[in-house]
Image (cartoon, grey):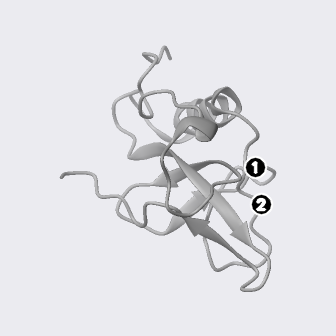
Amino acid sequence: MHFPDNAFGDPFDISRLPLRRPATGYAVQMLDTDTLLDCQRNEFMPVRNSSLQALFDDFSSAREAAANWVRQHCSSPDAHRLAIVPASYDPVLQRHVLIYGVLTAHP
């Protein structure tokens, strides 16, 4: 399956985003949910799951993981509901934080 450059959102550089809360990585979010793609298990898990490892170092790594997930789970490249988003990990709460909250598939 081929994916356009913006298949999971427009590429962005975290360091250049004007965020109220700092992001420490890129995450693949399932739209309309608070789930993120775990980097090691290749499955979506809730942000409150303490074993979740969802932060990618760069946009291209997150994009590659999202594309691989879609290849394995969707019949067509357009059949996904995934977006690459800025995220962080809160060591006090011991959970991932969605900087923009739960994104919806339809604005």
Residue closest to the far bottom:
93
Does residue 68 appear left or right of residue 76 in this picture?
right
Amino acid residing under circle 1: Cys
- For the residues labelled 1 and 2, say whether their Cβ atoms are less than 8 Å apart: yes
**Whole-percent x and y of residue 50?**
76, 79
Amino acid residing under circle 2: Gln
Image quadrant of residue 87?
bottom right
Image quadrant of residue 60?
top right
Q: Which mark is residue 53?
A: 2
C-alpha separation, residue under disc 1 versus residue under disc 2 = 6 Å
**Residues packed near mark 2 inside 10 Å, few (<14), some (14 to 19) or many (20 plus):** many
Q: Residue at x 77, y 54 (%)?
A: 41
Q: Nearer the viewer, residue 94 or 48?
A: 94
**Residues packed near mark 1 inside 10 Å, few (<14), some (14 to 19) or many (20 plus):** some
Q: Nearer the viewer, residue 104 or 10?
A: 10
Does residue 57 appear left or right of residue 100 in this picture?
right
Q: Which mark is residue 85?
A: none
- Residue under numbered circle 1: 39
Q: Nearer the viewer, residue 78 or 52?
A: 52
Does residue 38 appear left or right of residue 7 in this picture?
right
